[in-house]
Image (cartoon, grey):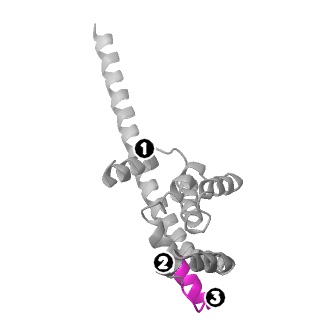
Amino acid sequence: MPDINQYLKLFFDRFLKLRDRPRELALGFSLGIFIGLTPSMGIQIAVAVFIASLLKWSKIAAALGVQIPNPLTAPFIYSGTYFIGAKIIGLEKSLKLSSLMTIEGVSTLIKGAPEIFAALTIGAVFIGVPLAVASYFLVYWFISRYQEKIKIGIQKKAKNFKHRLQQRKTRQKKR
């Protein structure tokens, strides 16, 4: 099984190598973060890529942003969004995992699905909007800096190349 640090490094490296303007990358990623928090597990990537393509934002960055809620983080994210959403809409009973292990518990879960879905959705909006805004500014700043460093490096290499080319021409003229 791959180490979590290797996974994060691979994710980070792939994100940095995306070629697009920082604004479109940041918008796509923040959209992915927002969609990833919604209770649409299983179709999140398709939804994020579809919306990103409609808005002409980075589809790849949107798909990467959706990966933040993954099997390791989903229990924490969805329990948090449910808790907040349930408090906002005033659900009196909260779900307890131990009560869901019986047939009656599963029946209660199915009967309460609309309220559960509403709580998850409202909680996702409540948490997702600030996280999406914060991720937009963070990604925009980071990608802008990264692309500027690359641009400076390319300019230095071009200047060095021109200088060597000029030296070669002067040496040829002296012969």
Viewer-side residue, 105 vs 37: 105
- Quarter of the image that includes the C terminus: top left
Residue at image location 57% in from the left, 79% down from the top: 105
Q: Label 3 to label 2, Cα distance in Å?
A: 21 Å
22 displayed left or right of 159: right
For discs 3 and 2, the disc positioned in front in the rendered view: 2
Residue 122: tell me if it is visible.
no
Predominant SS of the magenta segment: helix
Q: Quadrant of residue 47?
A: bottom right
Residue labelled with disc 2: 97
Q: Residue furthest right?
A: 54
Residue 172 location, x and y as percent?
Answer: 32, 11
Residue labelled with disc 3: 89
Q: As shown in the figure, which amino acid type bears the numbered disc 1?
A: Lys
Residue at image location 53% in from the left, 75% down from the top: 130
Q: Are marks 2 and 1 in contact (CB under 8 Å)?
A: no
Q: Residue furthest top?
A: 175
Which secondary structure, mark 3? Answer: helix
For discs 2 and 1, the disc positioned in front in the rendered view: 2
Residue 118 location, x and y as percent?
Answer: 66, 78
Write down the region rendered in magenta.
80-94
Residues packed near mark 2 inside 10 Å, few (<14), some (14 to 19) or many (20 plus): few
| Vertical order, 114 against 137 (above or below) | below
Which secondary structure, mark 1? Answer: helix
Q: As shown in the figure, which amino acid type bears the numbered disc 3?
A: Ile
Residue 106 location, x and y as percent?
Answer: 59, 75
Per the image, is 86 magenta? Answer: yes
Per the image, is 164 magenta? Answer: no
Q: As shown in the figure, which amino acid type bears the numbered disc 2?
A: Leu
Residue labelled with disc 1: 151
Q: Label 2 to label 1, Cα distance in Å?
A: 52 Å
| Vertical order, 38 against 165 (above or below) | below
